[in-house]
């Protein structure tokens, strides 16, 4: 009866909804599911952050509409955090914009710059809102394959000149979801030169900068000279402080780009709940011990998973960052019917081993042949998952 818009019809299938549906169905049957599919921390939000929200919510002043551009004290806290972590100085009045989670900012940003038919250069595989936000803005994604041979970095030299004339946006995401790949400053310098030459806006997604191991500290794109001329960078409290459900993040960088996103948001939402903003300040400026403990926890789980998979003959290098492992779909014994593609293999693991993993094709066509596992269950459950895998591969 009611016909969907062409933009909605053009959106790729959101495979994660189907995965969640299958997972719920299995649990309803009473099966003991080990969920390695979801990128959602299993640890609680730090107690001092919860406490701050509790007390702030008692104040009736926080119950009114929030400022669209975020509380000045929150923007200053973000500026202080960026200065301390990356050595990057940001103007809290013009170069920082708090968001209702970085996802909404990433999805809304293309509305500010894309006209119908304009292109965005999108890595594939990728976090789905890069494509979805482009399509909903009337734009078209041009896919940049992320392959193992290139370290899961886009090969910018392979993008046709004809496409570059039509493109306005370039997405980068390191540490990367889903591949866990990392980028160095030389790559970023190349991106800056490429963006300036081709008049591109760079959208840097830095959500996983604090989830790093073995002493590695991922850089911010904004650390590089010239980056602020072309870039907006998105960050979040979700993974660093176990606050995925709280929905608080920010954009920072080029003042013109921040202004444009703020204008879009002023027509869409009314800002972040003020008490939540105060809790966000508590997270950013609170004790550093939580972040150190978080890294140790996930590194221990990473080492457990890597050792277990290697014992099964699975080739895997320990990821330096994120809480994901990006794995080639292995050859299956004949008794498992020779299944090799990512959806079939993921379905097999759920059916035969009660394991949930994410098929790589859910992140784009170049993710086919891979699965993603998340380190979001206790070490004991990872060991049990490996034991279940041993029975079927």
Image (cartoon, grey):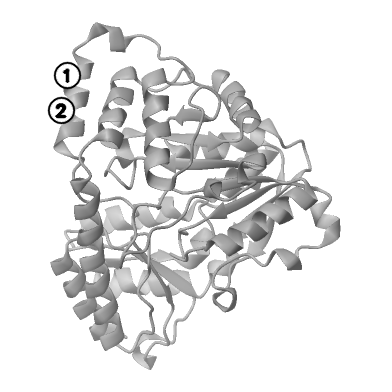
At horizontal 29% and vertical 40% (from top left) the residue drawn is 243
Disc assigned to residue 51: 2
Q: Does residue 65 appear in the picture of this structure?
A: yes
At horizontal 36% and vertical 34% (from top left) the residue drawn is 247
Q: Do the residues bearing badges 2 and 1 touch, measured as CB atoms within 8 Å?
A: yes
Q: Quadrant of the C terminus?
A: bottom left
Would residue 147 be found to the left or right of residue 200 on screen?
Answer: left
SS type, badge 1: helix
At horizontal 28% and vertical 20% (from top left) the residue drawn is 275
SS type, badge 2: helix
Would residue 251 be found to the left or right of residue 373 on screen?
Answer: right
Tell me residue 14's x, y (percent): 50, 51
Vertically, is 70 above or below 313? above
- Foreground residue among 256 and 304: 256
Q: Quadrant of residue 9?
A: top right
- Foreground residue among 6 and 368: 368
Vertically, is 57 above or below 314? above
Mark pair 2, 1: CA separation = 6 Å
Q: Quadrant of residue 203?
A: top right
At horizontal 66% and vertical 62% (from top left) the residue drawn is 144
Tell me residue 246's x, y (percent): 31, 34
Tell me residue 56's x, y (percent): 22, 18
Q: Quadrant of the N terminus?
A: top right
Read off the residue under disc 1: 55
Tell me residue 254's x, y (percent): 61, 35
């Amino acid at each position: 009866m009611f016909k969907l818009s062409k933009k909605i019809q053009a959106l790729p299938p959101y495979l994660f909804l189907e995965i969640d549906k299958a997972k719920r169905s299995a649990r309803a049957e009473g099966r003991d599911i080990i969920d390695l599919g979801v990128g959602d921390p299993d640890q609680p939000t730090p107690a001092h952050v919860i406490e701050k929200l509790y007390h702030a919510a008692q104040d009736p002043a926080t119950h009114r509409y929030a400022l669209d551009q975020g509380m000045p004290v929150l923007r200053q806290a973000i500026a202080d955090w960026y200065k301390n972590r990356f050595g990057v100085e940001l103007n809290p009045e013009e170069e920082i914009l708090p968001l209702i989670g970085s996802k909404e900012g990433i999805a809304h940003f293309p509305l500010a710059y894309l006209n119908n038919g304009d292109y965005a250069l999108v890595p594939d595989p990728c976090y789905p809102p890069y494509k979805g936000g482009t399509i909903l803005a009337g734009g078209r994604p041009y896919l940049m394959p992320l392959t193992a041979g290139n370290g899961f970095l886009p090969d910018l030299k392979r993008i046709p000149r004809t496409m570059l004339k039509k493109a306005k946006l370039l997405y980068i995401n390191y540490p990367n979801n889903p591949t866990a790949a990392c980028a160095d400053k030389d790559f970023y310098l190349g991106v800056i030169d490429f963006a300036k030459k081709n008049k591109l806006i760079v959208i840097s997604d830095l959500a996983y900068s604090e989830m790093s191991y073995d002493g590695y500290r991922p850089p911010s794109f904004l650390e590089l000279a010239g980056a602020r001329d072309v870039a907006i960078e998105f960050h979040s409290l979700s993974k660093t402080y176990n606050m995925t459900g709280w929905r608080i993040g920010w954009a920072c960088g080029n003042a013109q780009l921040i202004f444009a996103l703020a204008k879009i948001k002023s027509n869409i939402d009314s800002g972040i709940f003020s008490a939540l903003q105060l809790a966000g300040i508590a997270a950013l400026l609170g004790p550093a011990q939580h972040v150190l403990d978080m890294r140790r926890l996930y590194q221990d789980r990473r080492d457990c998973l890597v050792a277990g998979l290697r014992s099964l003959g699975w080739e895997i290098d320990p990821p330096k960052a994120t809480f994901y492992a990006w794995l080639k779909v292995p050859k299956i014994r004949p008794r498992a019917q020779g299944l090799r593609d990512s959806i079939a293999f993921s379905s097999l693991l759920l059916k035969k081993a009660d394991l949930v993993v994410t098929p790589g094709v859910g992140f784009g066509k170049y993710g086919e042949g891979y699965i993603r596992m998340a380190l979001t269950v206790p070490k004991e459950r990872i060991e049990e998952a490996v034991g279940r895998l041993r029975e079927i591969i």
